[in-house]
Amino acid sequence: METSRRWWALVVLAAAQFMVIMDTSIIGVALPDMQRELGFTQSGLQWVFNAYVIAFGGLLLLGGRLSDLIGARRVFSSGWVILIAGSVVAAAASTAWVEVLGRAVQGVGGALIAPAAMTLLMMLFGDKPKELGKAMSLYGAAAPAGGTAGVFLGGVITEYLSWPWVFIVYIPIGVATLAATRLLPAVKGRRGSVDVVGAISVTAGLALAVYAIVAADWIAGIAGAALLLLFLIVQRTVKQPLMPLSIWRTPGLATANLAMGLLGAAWIPMWYFLNLYLQQSLRFGAFASGAALLPMTVAVMVFMVGITARLLARFGAKPLIVIGLAVLAAGVLGLSFARPDGAFVSDVLPASLVAAIGMSLAYIPAMMSAMSGAKPEEAGLASGIVNTAYQAGSALGLAVMTALAVAQQQSVAFAGAAIVAVVGAVASLVLIRRPAVQEEQALNA
């Protein structure tokens, strides 16, 4: 594919990543209005968020497998069709259960889009190490930017329109993305079968694990653990598993996914409770709260696009992952000292910018380490695994920190997230042994 078309294709993929991740955050400030109009209970309201994240994180492995089997561009397009359908259901919902259903359908669409997009990116730039770092930086910046921008746009839409519009906005964007898929390479699939039992057990296991933490239900926890154990047993016994356990012999895959999971478990709770602090403690409205998070978005994008790729080529992945998680921990810990009657400039802005820099330094190196050692025919699977690690870490981390906040206070949740980031930094320092394949190529290019 010619050079200019490759970069236009990257724009389509980055925009898809932006929208998929934004879908996890755009509903945040709209939740109170949805609760009033749809009759959610206080405990049931969380499933507007969790239904998407669990369906998304739990089915990413299936999305990666389908990308390898039937072709990444076809799966990418199908994912957008499903996401549009889920958006229509969520926007038109008049009862709580229909809203949760729509969000789950959106998550299914996202689970197809994300790994297919990563597979297509590797097909476009995987044999060009100098361009791959830049492409990964642009693509990677779309994820945290989408998460933070979702808060801002959700505030604007909720304050000046109404909550259904946070879903309606996806319909024209999805149609435009489908029209732009002609820019993407047509990747042939290969013969094989789909591990349905594996897909169901890992998704249900993750859902029950999150529910067990949120509801303090040990029976659900045991059931979730049993389903996740069943998933591993199935992967060892079926002829064509959803996640062949042999892929974990790929250099750097396990440690990079551990780093990604802990990164999500620190970053997402920080973002969630920072939004609550802005609205509940500082009394910011929906629009003002979203605007207050814009400096973080700008910092993430500037560092990921302009700085992280250069540092990665110069120093390698391990130092950036370790330092990034440590810097993230410092920023999140700073937020734990925010005063209930504090001010944005002194209590929020400095610490949030430090946290954003840490996220920017760690995310791309961890993603590249997880992807770069995989065989071409396993690119979709590796992408599904690393995205699953991040989403599962996000869901479980948020559940744990929410439980801490309920039992103690919000500052304890920030401190807990900081500890998670420290654990990630130490684990990366100890466990990451050598550069991944693509990183070595980039350093020698």
Image (cartoon, grey):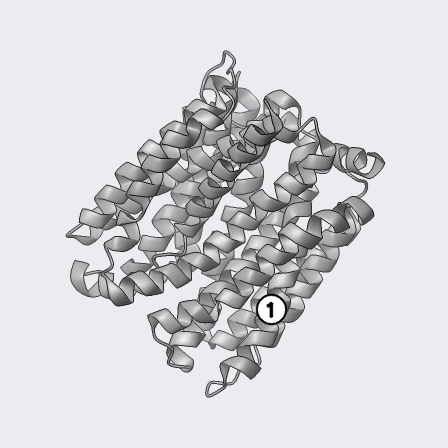
In the rendered image, the vertical position of residue 339 relative to residue 375, given as above or below: below
In the image, 46 versus 63, the foreground residue is: 63
Q: Position of residue 140 (x, y in %)?
A: 58, 46
Q: Position of residue 17 (x, y in %)?
A: 48, 43
Q: Is residue 374 left or right of residue 434?
A: left
The C terminus: image quadrant: top right
The N terminus: image quadrant: top right
Q: Amino acid at mark 1?
A: Leu
The outermost residue toward the bottom is 341
In the rendered image, the vertical position of residue 69 relative to residue 212, given as above or below: above
The outermost residue toward the right is 444
Residue at 39% over, 53% down: 211
* Count of numbered circles in the view: 1
In the rendered image, the vertical position of residue 42 relative to residue 192, given as above or below: below
- Name the residue carrying label 1: 353
| Badge 1 element | helix
The outermost residue toward the left is 94
In the rendered image, the vertical position of residue 382 relative to residue 362, given as above or below: above
In the image, 122 versus 400, the foreground residue is: 122
Query: Looking at the image, can residue 376 be seen?
Result: yes
Category of crowding for the residue at label 1, using alpha-carbon neighbours closer than 10 angstroms: few (below 14), some (14–19), many (at least 20):
many
Residue at 37% over, 56% down: 26
Query: Looking at the image, can residue 205 be seen?
Result: no
Q: Position of residue 141 (x, y in %)?
A: 57, 50
Residue at 46% over, 88% down: 341
